[in-house]
Image (tube, rainbow, N blue to C red):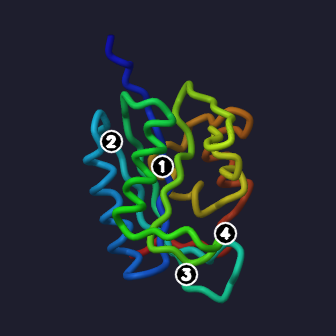
Amino acid sequence: MRAFWRPAYVAIGSNLDHPRERVEEACRHLGSLSETRLEARSRLYRTRPMGRQDQPEFINAAVGLVTRKSPHEMLEGLLEIEHRMGRIREERWGPRVIDLDLVWMVGNAVEDPGLTLPHPGVSMRNFVLYPLSDIAPTLDIPGHGRVLDLKVRLGGDGISPLE
């Protein structure tokens, strides 16, 4: 029996090695994941880094996918893309060539050591909410609220759309 198609939302960020191009590359990779279709993509945003401020600004985006993968299979696919693109995990909230975060998969709350869905930081990160509101403003993230409401509440300090 085939799994049902379900919506999944991924936040994308980069601040190293031509970040705009890395975000574009990540979108292409996400669109080629098996049993997954890329359905929507946000604008690109320039954002202030989270954590250490002595690093380059980030370029952020979000994509909406539909997939037959389980949440853990989707996470595995994201980690593989990061690895292929040269992501090295050294410092929390430090500079990175690519960062792919599974924000939410509709109907798939998960809480285990390797994966929490919805992503626990989603309601506190405008660099996730602004791109996500481009593609899914009415999406309800369980335990947090609607994307557009979260975006408005958090505000746009340190974020601007790229031209």
> For mark 3, does the 10 Å Cα neighbourhood hold few (<14), some (14 to 19), or many (20 or more) residues?
some
- Measure how far apart labels 1 and 2 are at the Cα level: 12 Å
Nearest-to-viewer mark from 1 and 2: 1
Q: Which residue is mark 4?
A: 92
Q: Say which label, 4 or 1, has the lower sequence index.
A: 1
Q: Which residue is mark 1?
A: 10
Q: Which residue is mark 3?
A: 57
Three-letter amino acid code at the position of disc 4: Arg
- Measure how far apart labels 4 and 1 are at the Cα level: 19 Å
Secondary structure of the residue carrying numbered label 1: strand
Three-letter amino acid code at the position of disc 3: Glu
> For mark 2, does the 10 Å Cα neighbourhood hold few (<14), some (14 to 19), or many (20 or more) residues?
few
Which corner quadrant holds the N terminus? top left
What percent of the width, then of the height, locates residue 99? 50, 63
Residue at the spot 72% in from the left edge and 58% down from the top edge: 154
Q: Say which label, 4 or 3, has the lower sequence index.
A: 3
Q: Residue furthest bottom?
A: 54
Q: Residue furthest top?
A: 1
Residue at the spot 49% in from the left edge and 43% down from the top edge: 136
Q: Say which label, 3 or 2, has the lower sequence index.
A: 2
